[in-house]
Amino acid sequence: MSSLARWCVRHRFSVILLWIALFVGLTSASGSLGTNFRDTFNLPGTESTKALGLLVQGFGQTEKGDQDSIVFHAVNGTSLADPATQAAITKTLAEIRTLPSVALVVSPFTKVGAAQISRKDSSIAYATVVFTGSAFTLKLDEIRAVVNKASTLRSSALEVEFGGRAISQLNQPKGNPGELFGILAAGIILILAFGSFLAMLLPLGTAIFALGTASAAVGLLTHAFSIATFAPQLASLIGLGVGIDYALFIVTRYRQSLLKGMSVEDSVATAVNTSGRAVLFAGATVCIALLGMLVLRLSFLNGVAIAASVTVLITMFAAITLLPALLRVMGMRALSRRSRRQLAQEGGSHESQHPRWDAWSAFVAKRPVPLAIAAIAVISVLIVPYFSLHLGNADQSTDPQTSTTYKAYSLLSQGFGAGFNGPLQIVAPITNASDLETMGKLAEGIRQNPNVAQVAPVQVSEDHKVALLMVFQKSGPSDIATSDLIKSLRTTTVPEFTQGTTLHAYVGGATAIFDDFARTLSDKLPLFIGVIVLLGCLLLLIAFRSLLIPATAALMNLLAAGASFGVVVAVFQWGWGGSLLNVGSGPIESFLPVIMIAILFGLSMDYQVFLVSRMHEEWVHTGDNKHSVLRGQADTGRVITAAALIMISVFVAFVFGGERVIAEFGIGLGAAVFLDAFILRTILVPAMMHIFGNANWWLPSWLDKKMPHLAVEAPDEAN
């Protein structure tokens, strides 16, 4: 690592130009080819997948493009039966049909669309608009043209709202304000930490430049992998946080070496050879945790894992190559003017620069047991909401209440029932006449379920080989009651009416697909956690030659994850503070636990590595556990908490970007980093290490001989 740093220092302008060329090349390629982000779900073997296959087989691909709704609501004593109102709506819908992005419009005032008028008082109706492409392939102007045309119908007597995936694209904020706010907050914290504007520019500039390069790379990868539409924001959230943190650790060590009187080149080499090794190790653990999602064998998560890993890799390599070159260009100006004057007058100093952290470390050393108990109590309280976790797919009922998609969802629920926004489909292959008779009996049995509002008549495909039942439940698509209904139909109702017959019926539909996705992920979650915990423990075992340190780290990571999930459940599922974020309460996205655990285990490992590697360095020199823990915590406490504040600022800034799923990640990751840095690494880990004593560093001699040697942080060259 020292040789790499010195090479980057001596060829600093070449390194900078290479990074600029990489950025320009990737950005140009991404701009010319465009991006192809897409959400794809592949759940082989599930009932909903079998039902979808039969549906396509029997009824064909009935949906060439995205289907959205224009909802009409007659108010102030008016009625949709009014001829003038119907004529105006019919004329406007005919004009919408002529738009180039629209393939089909089904009016509620036609024979085909007669069921699209509410039966209660006929005050609510909807028109179905079928676009020529999927929601994410349509241009915003094409979607906006439909909205603008239909909006001309709005009056004091007629409300007009819009729902559907394509329409929801118009709700997305322009740009990514989270990045800007996160960068500003990080800049303020860095200035306070360094006392130098120029020193602040180093980690911030390196992280932003690396993030731009990574974003272009991810855009290109969308042509090779199926990458979810929210992946760019998630990758930016992770990349900006870890990018600034990695650069911060190296710049901090560089400044410490300068203050000891070392030359600029030696200071850079020392920083990269010490903190740079920890950055390399920490970045590798983050990537391993993210790529652990590949073991789940779900295409939807594979792309997210790859995009996030590529972003982390690029920011990590920028920290150990581009940053050393920039440090050499910056030279002594990385110190504040006051520090430079003091260094010139007094020379280098080997005294501690953090007396407050010295005092806190001593405080923890004197009271490890009560502090450990207090920290565990705080974490335990925050974990409680986790046991109410309900995974699912947040629908448009969780959109901001001022949005047209939320209003459309509410009107459709009011006019047609909550289940109308996500009905279930019972699909079965038909092999003989008795199968159709059984299907009819099954329909009658389903109607007896107290959560079923309506069951449509049996539909049969033209070739008479597939039958379809539409089931409208009373509960909303994302409600727990709907999940219970799906389970009840599959395990009780369908088997009861098909037993002893030749009919094989499957419960499907979009709502069932998302429910299966949640169940599949829940079933695979223990395997996933086991894989990344085991890999993380193996890495720490090799790095620190200890059994207790990896075990403690694994426990800390699980505690942080559980507490952060508790916070997410309280905010987004229970609705605590949801009004401040302008989001509705609903289920937690089914893929959130897997992705969050991958990120959290990686980020938690970062702080564990930076903290324990400094302790391990002292242990190797002194063999005194108490001194090693004291010195390690005192020397790293300030930079770890500063890094955590930066990461928290970045994560929380993304909360207000307008997307619920990104807000979930922002709150969850922000809470996890706060707990990790200010409760676990500042209190619980040091306290536990004081309690364990020399046992922290124990490893059976036979195992020590068989393991390879890996130095996470080499001894400081100044020592």
Image: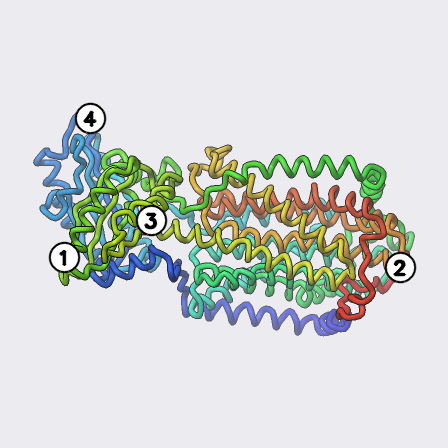
Upstream in sequence: badge 2 or badge 4: 4
Sort mark 1 into few (<14), some (14-19) or many (20+) by Cα contacts within 10 Å: few
Q: Which residue is labeled 2 in the image?
A: 621
Q: Are marks 2 and 1 in contact (CB under 8 Å)?
A: no
**Which mark's residue is nearer the viewer, 2 or 3?**
3
Q: Which residue is labeled 1 in the image?
A: 433
Closer to the camera in the image, 323 or 440 = 440
**Which mark's residue is nearer the viewer, 3 or 1?**
1
- The residue at 44%/54% (across/down) is 520
Upstream in sequence: badge 2 or badge 3: 3
Q: Secondary structure at mark 3?
A: helix
Q: Are marks 3 and 1 in contact (CB under 8 Å)?
A: no
Q: Which residue is labeled 4 in the image?
A: 76
Q: Secondary structure at mark 1?
A: helix
Depicted 149 relative to depicted 532: above or below: above
Sort mark 2 into few (<14), some (14-19) or many (20+) by Cα contacts within 10 Å: few
**Which mark's residue is nearer the viewer, 2 or 4?**
2
Q: Are marks 2 and 4 in contact (CB under 8 Å)?
A: no
- Using the rendered view, name the quadrant where residue 38 is placed: bottom left
Sort mark 3 into few (<14), some (14-19) or many (20+) by Cα contacts within 10 Å: some
Q: Position of residue 351 (x, y in %)?
A: 89, 50
Q: Say what amino acid the circle numbered 1 marks.
A: Ala
Upstream in sequence: badge 3 or badge 4: 4
Q: Which residue is labeled 3 in the image?
A: 490
Q: Secondary structure at mark 2?
A: helix
Q: Say what amino acid the circle numbered 4 marks.
A: Asn
Residue at mark 2 to residue at mark 3: CA–CA distance = 64 Å
Residue at mark 3 to residue at mark 4: CA–CA distance = 45 Å
